Amino acid sequence: MLKITKQRKILLEYLKKKNTPESAEMIFLSLPNGAMNLSTVYRNLDKFCEHHLVEKYQLGNIFYYKLVGPEHKHYLVCDKCGDLIEIDCHLSSYIETETKKHNFKVRNHDLTIYGLCSKCS
């Protein structure tokens, strides 16, 4: 069981308001001044991931975080402006078939597609 501290409550409330993944730095800069330091943001986001409250996405060499929702999502990432466009995941049945065939236990899967958005192309 994860203990909900004051800082964790602040982070969870912030993440509930966001529709797109954000980096720890983006979250830190958006919090009220003095709410917590950057290392506390990272530490708590990792704890949330361990307890399956938050999904962690790696886009390039930066990690982004988002509350776990009812459906798993993937992203289109614009190479020029960095916009993230959320897309539905339609891989679930395929993954289930392939993992059963190989007796493989999935921990997570990720698909990120890079290119140019409509504004930049």
Image: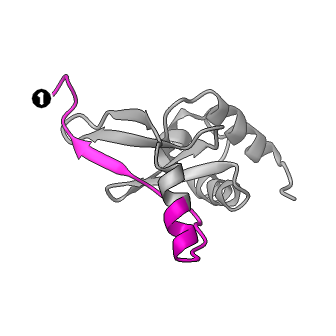
Residue at 15% over, 28% down: 120
1 on left or right of 103: right
Please give the residue where the numbered disc 1 appears in the rendered image: 121
Please identify the residue farthest to the bottom as the structure is shown: 103
83 w.r.t. 114: above or below: above
Point 57% across, 30% down: residue:
18
Res 28 visible:
yes
Of all residues, the one furthest to the top in this rendering is 119
The secondary structure that dominates the magenta segment is loop
Tag 1: amino acid: Ser
Residue 115: give x, y in percent of width and height: 20, 41
Mark 1 is surrounded, within 10 Å at the Cα level, by few (under 14), some (14 to 19) or many (20 or more) other residues, namely few
Residue that appears at 59% across and 58% down: 39
Vertical relation: 49 (above or below) 11: below
Q: Quadrant of the C terminus?
A: top left
Q: Is 113 included in the stretch rendered in magenta?
A: yes
The residue located at (18%, 37%) in the rendering is: 80
Residue 8 at x, y percent in the picture: 75, 46
Label 1 sits on a secondary structure element that is loop
Image x and y of residue 113, in percent: 29, 46
- Up-down: is 43 above or below 82? below
- Coordinates of residue 58 in the picture (x, y in percent): 42, 56
Q: Which stretch did the figure color magenta?
A: 97-121
